[in-house]
Every structure is written in C-alpha cells, then in structure tokens.
Image: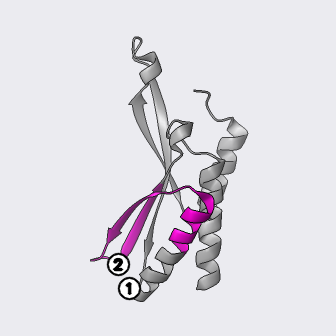
Amino acid sequence: MPSQSPIKKNSYEQTLASYHWQIVHSPTHSATHSADKSISTQAAAQKTFYFKDFKNINAFLTHLTETIIKLNHHPAIVFDPSSKSIALNLTTHDAGHSLSDRDMTFIKTLEKAVKNSC
C-alpha cells in the first residue's frame, strides 16, 4: 500500500487540528508481507464530543446520522451516558484502515452541521 505523500499528510493534520480531532496510529503486521514481518501503520481520526444534556446529544446524533447517510461513510461510535459523551473513530477501510479524503470530507461536513446548529 502506498503511503500518503507528505503534503497530503500535512493537509490532513491541519484539517484535524483545526477541528480538534486527533490522529491515532496503530501498528499492524502487513498481511501482504507476512513472510518478512513488515509492519505498516493504520491511522484513524478520533474525537470525543461532550454535551450538557441528552437533548443536545439527540441533536448531535441527528447531524451525525445525516452526515453518514449523505456521505455513505461512517465512524465507530461509542456513547457514554454517564459522562454525556460520544466518541467517534473514523478511518477508511478500503484505504487500508488509513485516513483518506473521505474522512476529511466527513469531518468537515459534520463539524459544519454541528457548528451551525449551536
């Protein structure tokens, strides 16, 4: 799998930072190079959203669902009712579990929807 160019990688990092998302890397043994035990890096974008009440959580989930449907792309979602938080983990599976333009579009679309509703 070809790695992201430095320009594309920096662009992703700038986009993520501007919306307060983090890049999380996890090393994995490459299935295509198992004989030489090559290691590749998988990357995901993560962010936890905190809410003051369940009404705000419901509004956020509406925006999240609309973004998923519109872009046909979805994050892993973890809801913690005790802290009134929702954690999202976003990666592109068909890009080798790495970040792609689809992830950046998803983040921008979701963040714009959330910002415009608050």
Residue 105 rendering spot, x and y as whole percentages: 65, 57
The N terminus lies in quadrant = top right
Residue 25 versus residue 54: which sits nearer the camera? 54
Residue 7 versus residue 114: which sits nearer the camera? 114
Q: Residue at x 44, y 82 (%)?
A: 58
Quarter residue 53 falls in? bottom left
Quarter residue 6 falls in? top right
Residue 49 rendering spot, x and y as whole percentages: 45, 71
Q: Residue furthest top?
A: 35
The C terminus lies in quadrant = bottom right
Residue carrying label 1: 54
Q: Is residue 9 magenta?
A: no
Residue 53 makes an appearance in the image? no
Colour mode?
A: one colour
Residue 41 makes an appearance in the image? yes
State which region is magenta.
63-89
Residue 84's tag is: 2
Residue 71 versus residue 116: which sits nearer the camera? 71
Q: Amino acid at mark 2?
A: Lys
Residue 2's tag is: none
Please, what secondary structure does the residue beneath circle 2 have?
loop
Quarter residue 48 falls in? bottom left
Q: Amino acid at mark 1?
A: Phe
Q: Are marks 2 and 1 in contact (CB under 8 Å)?
A: yes
